[in-house]
Image (cartoon, coloured by chain):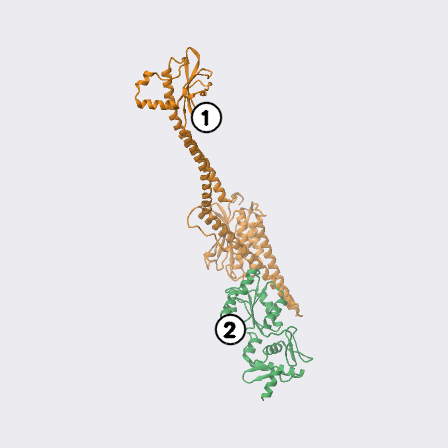
Amino acid sequence: MRLLIIEDEPGIARFLKEGLEEEHFAVDTAFDGESGLELGMSNDYDLCLIDWMLPKLSGIEVCRQLRKAGSAVPVIFLTARDTLDDVVFGLGAGADDYVKKPFAFEELLARIRARLRQNTPTTGPLTAGALWLDPETHRAGCNRHDLTLTPKEFALLEYLLRNLDRVCTRSRIIEHVWDIHFDADTSVIDVYVNFLRRKLEAAGCTGLIKTVRGVGYVIRTPEANNEEKSNE
Amino acid sequence: MSLRNRIAVYYTAATAVLIALVFTTVYLMVEGVVYRHFDQELTMAAARVVSITDGRLNDRRPMEMEDSDREKEDDEHRKHRRERLRTEFIQYSAADGTPISRSGNLGLNALQVKTGSTATIYFNTTVGGLAVRQIQLPVEGNGDPQPRWISVARPLGDAIAMLLDLRSVLMLSFPAILITLFALTRAIAAKSIRPVEEAIMAAENITREHFERRIPLPANRDELYRLSATFNALLDRLQEAFNREKQFTADASHELKTPLSAVQGTLEVLIRRPREREHYEERIRFCLLELHRMAGLIEQLLLLARHDAREVSATLRSIDINALIREVAERQESRAGEKEISIRVPEESSFIVAADREMLGIILDNIIANAVNYSPRSRTVTIRTGTENGLPFCTISDMGKGIEESKLEAVFERFYRVDASRSIGSGGSGLGLSIVKKLADLQGITVRAESRPGEGATFRLLFPYPSDSSSR
């Protein structure tokens, strides 16, 4: 899951990036409205955290222009402005949620997860057959066997599970799992997929991640898998 | 009582007095005319009686005209005389009012005699139930010192009926006019105060949420127009103050909550998992710095609040500003040193001005810190003191990028920053110069920003009292 943070206060931007990266999000930061909008327009983010009072272009304006350009990316406002009018105005400008400064990091995290869940409308762990992955607790496993995954492996598996039965192209995987500082060499995905497959096999889940030749990867639900087999 | 009722009542009461006055005058004039006519006739009749009966008043004969006189008259006069005789009552009375002789038409009735008066008088009375106007004339009785009386009376007849009619017409029309007038005035008053009621309704709709609403101005440029316009102007000023206050609160809360969020978030993320010792130290140092910044801001806010509430007053004393400048410059030395900025203080060892020592210290602290902040590396901040038109001044100049002319006033506003992006780089709170302005005002010091873009900025303090030249 890849997030964009637009926040002019370096102290706040730093702890947000650090904390969210530790939660296995890929995080990009921008320190003013203009560069934030540019990033938001040119990348496919899963969620944006935007401060209201920004130099060059206000957070409200960034949000409006994103919406005008047809982007449906979830937007959470982070702001010290806390009157009822401000909240109503902010949500009216196209934000999906509104977090008042100062906020508890855990609350922000919960709100981000809640927003992301709306794209995959389930609570609790993501599953495919015997495989399960819980984004809240950072644990994944196969039946009773726990998997020990690196943050990137975890993020990759989470992304594939969130897009169950949908083929994820290499470029989309790069966009959502790695941040902007990553050199867009898609072969690294194949390496990570191989690591994942080996760990899954060791835990007893074989052949879950399918390669779609020339396109990317997909995890299919057992039902879809059976259909495929019967067609063969 | 509502305004329109009060207007109607006052107006009607005033008119009632006026109409009563007019009606009374009219009635009295008509009455006067009628009585004067009667009185003339009665005077003539009395004179005739006196001339006819002169010297024969003692005779008991009925008072009739001599036959010879009668013959002289033609028919017309005779007829007239008969008519008059029938309606004219004549009586000759003794001093005590007892009739000595009277005209036949009186029969057994007697005319009233008012013995109290010694002059000729006219009055209304009745004789045998008939309303009459009467003259009473004193005459000499044969050597008698007491006067005797000749009374002549004529029935008032139609005249009294006319006067009574007139009176009842006036009496009836008086309340009718007043009632009509009251109703009319009420209606007119209601119509003319309707704009006032509209203004009241418009004013009631101006609330916190809809502060931008105004009272519609009436078409006529009358007093109501002026009232509404004045009221709107007052509202404009109120709204401006209200917005300034709101902006200040929003700015202050932003400035406080931003470092607070940074500290809270940093610490929360920090304790989520074990980390390297250096990492802890770096983050804690960052938090302390932020807390320091907040403490400074809170102190400035309290300072502003205290001066807004006028809890503090300036105590002007003769102080050595040059010594104070050296003190402040020393305090700023460490920060200036980081940017290799040198602070040049005045050469004279002392220069006396009238100011509040503590307040002037805060002013110089803020302006000099500001100059250091906005100076590029390795430049000089110059402080000068001197006399201009007999009054002392102090200037603090930096070699920064200066301030645009249009923003020279605005730099003294709260939370105003020349650089629109807050908190990046310069690091001030945005309150410093507004505190300077406030404290300067309290001491009567004029503070001005002067600048040409690209050539740095100069802040000039002008003191209101001449410096003590002997102590220089």
| Side of B238 relative to B221 (left or right) | right
Give me the chain letter of mark 2: A
Left or right position of B420 against A199 = left
The location of residue A177, given as percent across then percent down, is: 58, 76
- Neighbor class of circle 1 (other Cα within 10 Å; few <14, some 14-19, many 20+) is few
From the viewer's perspective, tell me whether residue A99 is left or right of residue B92.
Answer: right
Question: What is the quadrant of residue B51 in the picture?
Answer: top left
* Alpha carbon distance from label 1 to label 2: 123 Å
| The chain in green | A
Residue B49 in percent (x, y) is at: 37, 18
Is residue B268 placed above or below B102 in the rendered structure? below
Comparing B274 with A107, the one in front is A107
Please tell me which residue is depicted at 40% across the width and 16% down the height of the picture: B62
Q: Which mark is residue B129?
A: 1
Give the chain letter for orange: B
Residue B290 screen position, x and y as percent = 60, 61
